[in-house]
Amino acid sequence: MLKKINSLLLVVLMLLTCGSCAGLTKMVDVDEEVAVPPDIVFLGDSIAAGFGLDGYADDDLYNCSSYANILAEKYGGELPEDCPHKMVNKAVSGATSADLLKSLKSGELDDVLAECDAVVVSIGGNDLLAILFKLLTKIGYNMESGELDFSDVDLISAALDVIGFESDIDYALEGFRNNLKDIALQLRAKTGGRIFVQTLYDPLEYFRKIKVLSDLSDEKIDRFNDIVAACAVDGDELLYTTVDVAGAFDGRCGDLTKISDFDIHPNAAGHEIIADKVDDAVRKFTYTYKKTVEVTDEDAVRNLILICAAAGVLMTAVIIIVIVVAVKKSKNK
């Protein structure tokens, strides 16, 4: 009789524990750390858009060798297979800092910014360089010959133009300063991702023989980059990390841009260099993505222990009862 009861209890215990063991683990989402951003957004102007590269189109920024596409391919190949990867390029050729600020304030970029792990910004070149280019032609630069041609230039008028253009540039720089600070604050409010802002190279260093222009360009673009560095900090808060594109292009703009064709934009080699500089800055931080993993369900383990303990107590009680009953029967005989 005792053997039958023990066997029955053992079967019940096995059924309880086997059923409980099946639920001892559960699937949960955890943060997995990676070295590069799974979701990256590019904002700004024609430099970020890849203007002038083979495959570029105003309505398709994803088929040229821009630094955005270089990094998208690089990171997509490096991230784990179970890590979703996305690159969005919202740069607009011809955009000024005022244009980008307007887009941010409109809310049209809110969705992509809310989801991203990193934002890379190239902006401000159109605030400044258009003025310098106007000055270049005003003082007698001949695009066809590549030489200064004073034959149709009133030198007194040209000197006054330089003075006037310098005032225009200073005004543009102050506007850029105000806009960039607002852009940084807007971005910080709209994304939890890391923010990176590029400095501006000086394409007019190519025209060193036009000293009045190259000196002016060098001075003003230095001020531009000082503004980029200064606006990175708001009180004790770091709003963004500065990417030193200017330093990488210094003395090399003739090779890394199309300036010899009177085009300030980076060529394919220039985009490779920008990609390297952005990549260096990005890798100073780590990023995370959600990964589904199987983990021990502590509540289920706790319940199993209680079930086993209860079953053990029950078996012990039954055994004791059976023994007591058997003893009484033995005495009665």
Image: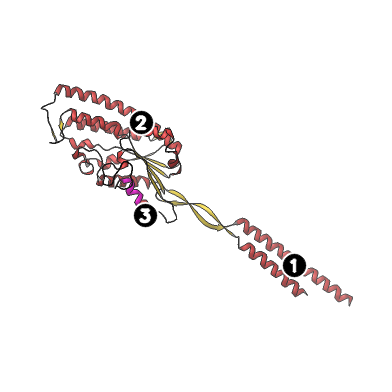
SS at circle 2: helix
Asked whether the beta carbons under mark 2 and mark 3 sit within 8 Å of each other, the answer is no
Where is residue 122 shown, x and y percent of the image?
33, 38
User: In the image as oriented, which residue stretches furthest toward the left?
Assistant: 151
Where is residue 121 shown, x and y percent of the image?
35, 39
Where is residue 315 shown, x and y percent of the image?
74, 67
Q: Give the Cα separation between the discs numbered 1 and 3.
A: 61 Å
SS at circle 3: helix
Residue, x 27% and y 43% (percent of image)? 248
Where is residue 80 shown, x and y percent of the image?
42, 55
- Residue 316, disc: 1
Residue, x 37% and y 54% (percent of image)? 77
Q: Nearer the viewer, residue 237 or 67?
A: 67
Q: Quadrant of residue 94?
A: top left
Three-letter residue code for mark 3: Gly
Which tag is nearer the camera, tag 1 or tag 2? 2
User: In the image as oriented, which residue stretches furthest toward the front?
Assistant: 59
Residue, x 34% and y 48% (percent of image)? 71
User: In the image as oriented, which residue stretches furthest toward the right?
Assistant: 332
- Residue 98, disc: 2
Name which of mark 2 and mark 3 comes first in the sequence: 3
For the question of whether residue 185 can be seen, the reply is no
Residue that mark 3 sits on:
77
Q: Give the Cα separation between the discs numbered 1 and 2.
A: 81 Å
Q: Nearer the viewer, residue 268 or 307?
A: 268
Q: Give the Cα separation between the discs numbered 2 and 3.
A: 35 Å
Three-letter residue code for mark 1: Thr
Dot 2 crowding, Cα within 10 Å, few <14, some 14–19, many 20+ = some
Dot 1 crowding, Cα within 10 Å, few <14, some 14–19, many 20+ = few
Span of residues in magenta? 64-73
